Image (spheres, rainbow, N blue to C red):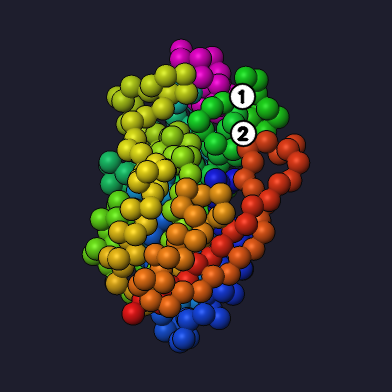
Amino acid sequence: MNYLGSKVRLSEFIFNVISNSVDQKLSDCSFFDLFAGTGAVGNYFYSKVKSIGYNDREYYSYILNSAFYSEVGEGRYQSMLDELNQLEGMEGFIFQEYSESGSAGRLYFSANNGKKIDSMRLYIEQLFQCSEINEDLYILLIATLLVAADKVANTASVYCAYLKNLKKTATFNIELNPIKRAMTFVEYKVHKDDSNMLIKNITGDILYLDPPYNGREYGSYYHLLNTISIYDTKFQPKGKTGIRSYETSKFCLKKEADKALLEILNSADFKHIFLSYNNEGFISQSRIKEMMTALGHYECSSLKYPRFTSHRGDPKSYTEESLHHLIKY
């Protein structure tokens, strides 16, 4: 999934900085990702630490991160995917509101894929409500559907807009394939809470922070993933893009971001706090250093990194990504 702010390509850099900065074996440490997104960083660290935690208030994130630790057997998983792939499409909520030929005229999916998403998601829900599948399999199947739907979405990577005409990948038929899952057991927990509230109720060794850097609000940019996840078909999609209601993050508001970060740093009961932030974010690098220095020992490592772009043909441009480290007194 081409995810805004994803740290997939930075995971090795982040791991090397953290492993060289922490004064004990990672295998003896707990690790908590407070703004987990699709779980790229946590999924890189999970086999290297004692325990791991994820948090993100977006429901699709909760689904994806929970599914990574699913214990469903491969045979059962594959048989369910085969069953779902063979379903006939139906003209349901996603077809009508977000697909080609739908009544709302929003071109997020081809007509066929919109129908298939509806039939698959409704069938998953029916199986769960009738107790024919447990919650573990229910979450795993929804996560698999999200990944598959994203591959055939008619967007430039985010869902704040759709393309005027179906792009090539959007014309492909949706197909559910097994998604990557954890290979080894580790103690884990997945939350879906407001980060500034949750931080007051958790404790551990290593806290990793990757909040929004600017006004790009994930509730808006990925609203359709939430809609497929929740499948609350009675809600009224708003405007041209069919967005759902969401609460703007304080980190996406220039006047609030500084205060929100300081609140987390002050409240965090973790010895090591690592913050990913780039040089174009609302909070300046010097201000982050000032905050952290007031609370303990401060270090910083930086790396030039390709800027996120929703247009693959755009020329490469770079930003400087910094990993700030606070050892709290």
Q: Is residue 268 visible?
A: yes
- Amino acid carrying label 2: it is Ala
In this rendering, is residue 10 above or below 218? Answer: below
Kindly identify which residue carries mark 1: 163
Q: How many marks?
A: 2
Indicate whether 24 appears above or below 154. below
- Amino acid at circle 1: Leu
| Position in image of residue 140 (x %, y %) | 43, 51
The picture quadrant where one finds residue 93 is top left
Mark carried by residue 156: 2
Whether 105 is among the magenta residues is yes
Q: Position of residue 162 (x, y in %)?
A: 56, 26
Q: Note whether 9 is above or below 116 in the view shown.
A: below
- Where disc 2 sits, the SS reads loop
Q: Position of residue 241 (x, y in %)?
A: 47, 23
Q: Residue at x 48, y 44 (%)?
A: 214
Q: Mark on residue 282?
A: none
Q: Provide residue 300's location: percent of width, then percent of height.
A: 54, 70
Residue 51 seen in render: no
Residue name at image x 67 percent, y 36 percent: 311
Image: magenta residue range: 99-116
Query: In the figure, residue 85 lies in which quadrant?
Result: top right
Look at the magenta stretch and give its main secondary structure. Answer: loop
SS state under label 1 = loop
